[in-house]
Structure formats: C-alpha cells, structure tokens
C-alpha cells in the first residue's frame, strides 16, 4: 500500500519553477521569506525542513507546501509517513497521515541526531557515554543499544537492516556498521585518515574522506570506490536510493549528484548563489538556496539514468565555460 501524504496545514501551491541550463526544472518549495534552518530530509515525494513556523514540508505529487507542527525541531529525518527530530535533547516523531505527534526517547541524559528507516529510529545517546548509538522499534515500542563501545559514536544513519555511523574508537574517525538481522557490528572503513558523515541506502554506504572527497562502499560486493575527488572539496553528503548528493565547492557552493547504478556524476544546481544542505530520495533532490537573499528551499526532479548521462556532459561544458570566464 502506498503511503498517504496527509498534512496538517496546506499552504498555497508553489509555482516558482524554472529550467536551468542543464535540464533540471528547479522549484522553489518554501513560500516564507524567513530563513530556513537545519537539515532537509526527503522520502518518496515529500521534502521536510524546519523554519520559524516549525516543521514544514512540500509534496511533489500535489505541488503543495504544508506546516505540520509549530515545534522547534533540530536534526530531522523522514521515512514514509513518519518524521523524527531532536528537540532539547529528546527525540520526537510525527505521523503525517494521522497528524499525531509522539515521544520516542526522553531520557534525561540527552539524545540527538535521529535517523529513521521503516519502523526503526536510531540516534546518538548520552545515557552511559557521551556518544553511544541507540535504536527504537516503533512497532514494538522498545528501545535497544546498537553500539556502546568506549569512545564517541556520532552521525548514525539507517537503511533497512543496516545502520552506519562515524566512530573514534581508534583515535580518529572511522566508519562502522551494524546489521539488525544478524545483530552484528562490522567495520566499513578504518584506513588512515578521517572518514566522516556516513550515509546508507540499501547495500551502499557513502562518506566524506578527510572532509573533502566522497567515497562509497558496496556491502554486497565488498568493494570500495571513489565517487568524487575534485580538489575543490565536497561536503553536506546525503544519499537516497541510488542517488548521492553533496555540496560542491567548484563554484560558490553548488549541488552535485552521483547515480550509483550508472556510476555517473551530474550537476543539479550551479546557480551563482550559494546552495547547501542537499538531500535526496529516489528521483527527488532538495537543498537550501540563497539566490533570493534568504535561505529558501528549492527542489528538482532527477531524470532517468539515460538522461543523466547527457546532463553530465552538459554540466561539464557549463563548468568549462565557467572556468574560462574566471
């Protein structure tokens, strides 16, 4: 059964759309002139973010922006009809279909950086160590430890049965994983240097290498591969389904993508203004954009892989022209 994207308060339909020079139709998703803050999250056709109104979103299927809650949300994540976020050291959830809010973890020790996939929520927990990884099953209403190793674990992400995080147990940042099915922990990347800010989707794990490059690992094939090593630097990494997105410093903070099925890189937004905080799911990408003087939310539909190959060539031509003009 497909999820029903019911909403709390529906606002005016956004009609600010334009095709950029390399084929994407960009849509302004937020109608407020107030600067948005924090991260974005995408699941299916829905993008969620926070601004001064509270927890907000946009549904690409209906073309409608909505406000679901006036709560002051921190880091957030969405899967299907469920949005989760951190607020004052606690973890809360909101059901987009039933318009109901509910607590997930309110331990006095403090919880931050939640992520959700299906019925499982994960977060960084301070009840026994400054940075352990805990989880919660929404279907059974039970919390459970995932990693309580000495040291600091941070930035957990989850996809299906696989949870990943960055871990400093070796006196540097490495990437570790946990399989909910086998209840086993395993290292993903522990080579010299720092590996940080992991993401996971299906069998693919991605991360920032030395806070500059983007690398990936195929859990099924047990092979590592480079995604982007441009010396300008990449940050704000996010993955959804077969698409990886990041902020790229080749321009003034652009948004690039990578198709894991075709292994091709393509530009998403090369607007002269700064773009940050990208997120993706399936064929939807969204990001924060300063082209209008405020921190607005923009989005775009990612074309099919065959079209992406042509767009990648077009984006390369745009970059070459840009470099010749500087």
Image: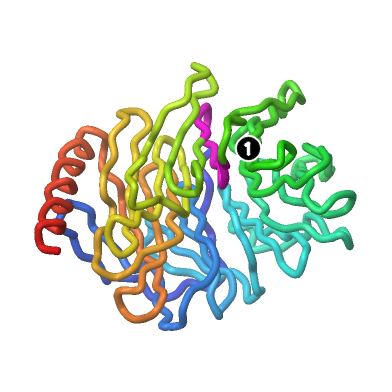
Q: Which residue is mark 1?
A: 174
For label 1, the crowd category at 10 Å Cα-Cα, with few meaning under 14, some 14 to 19 and many 20 or more, is many
Q: Is residue 325 left or right of residue 97?
A: left
Magenta includes 308?
Answer: no
| Total numbered circles | 1
Q: Secondary structure at mark 1?
A: strand
What residue lies at 77% left-to-right and 64% top-to-bottom? 89
Q: Quadrant of residue 96?
A: bottom right
What residue lies at 66% left-to-right and 42% top-to-bottom? 172
Q: Residue furthest top?
A: 221
What residue lies at 31% left-to-right and 51% top-to-bottom? 301
Magenta: main secondary structure: strand
Residue 143: x and y in percent read 83, 44
Q: Is residue 94 left or right of residue 129?
A: left
State which quarter of the image contains the C terminus.
bottom left
Vertical relation: 51 (above or below) 235:
below
Residue 189: x and y in percent read 58, 30
Q: Is residue 151 left or right of residue 274?
A: right
Residue 61 visible in this rendered orientation of the protein: no
What residue lies at 27% left-to-right and 60% top-to-bottom? 251
Foreground: 283 or 294?
A: 294
Foreground: 156 or 214?
A: 214
Residue 206 visible in this rendered orientation of the protein: yes
Write down the region rendered in magenta: 194-205
Residue 136: x and y in percent read 77, 44
Residue 209: x and y in percent read 49, 41
Query: What colour scheme governs how the chains and residues are painted in the rendered image of this protein?
Result: rainbow
Foreground: 116 or 163?
A: 163
């Amino acid at each position: 059964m497909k999820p029903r994207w019911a909403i709390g308060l529906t606002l005016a339909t956004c009609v600010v759309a334009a095709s950029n020079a390399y084929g994407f139709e960009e849509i302004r998703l937020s109608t407020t002139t107030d600067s948005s803050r924090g991260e974005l999250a995408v699941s299916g056709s829905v993008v969620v973010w926070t601004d001064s109104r509270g927890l907000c979103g946009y549904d690409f299927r209906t073309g409608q922006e909505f406000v679901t809650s006036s709560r002051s949300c921190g880091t957030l994540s969405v899967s299907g009809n469920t949005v989760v976020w951190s607020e004052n050291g606690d973890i809360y959830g909101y059901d987009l279909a039933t318009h109901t809010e509910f607590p997930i973890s309110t331990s006095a020790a403090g919880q931050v950086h939640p992520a959700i996939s299906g019925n499982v929520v994960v977060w960084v927990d301070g009840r026994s160590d400054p940075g352990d990884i805990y989880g919660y099953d929404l279907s059974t209403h039970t919390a459970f430890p995932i990693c309580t190793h000495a040291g600091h674990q941070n930035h957990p992400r989850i996809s299906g049965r696989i949870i990943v995080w960055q871990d400093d147990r070796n006196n540097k940042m490495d990437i570790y994983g946990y399989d909910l099915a086998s209840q086993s922990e395993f290292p993903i990347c522990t080579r010299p240097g720092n590996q940080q800010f992991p993401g996971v989707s299906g069998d693919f794990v991605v991360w920032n290498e030395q806070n500059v490059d983007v690398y990936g690992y195929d859990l099924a094939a047990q092979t590592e591969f480079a995604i982007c090593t441009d010396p300008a630097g990449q940050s704000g990494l996010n993955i959804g389904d077969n698409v990886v997105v990041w902020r790229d410093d080749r321009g003034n903070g652009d948004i690039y993508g990578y198709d894991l099925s075709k292994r091709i890189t393509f530009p998403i937004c090369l607007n002269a203004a700064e773009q940050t905080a990208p997120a993706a799911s399936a064929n939807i990408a969204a990001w924060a954009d300063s082209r209008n003087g405020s921190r607005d939310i923009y989005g775009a539909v990612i074309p099919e892989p065959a079209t992406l190959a042509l767009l990648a060539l077009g984006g390369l031509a745009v970059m070459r022209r840009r470099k010749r003009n500087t």
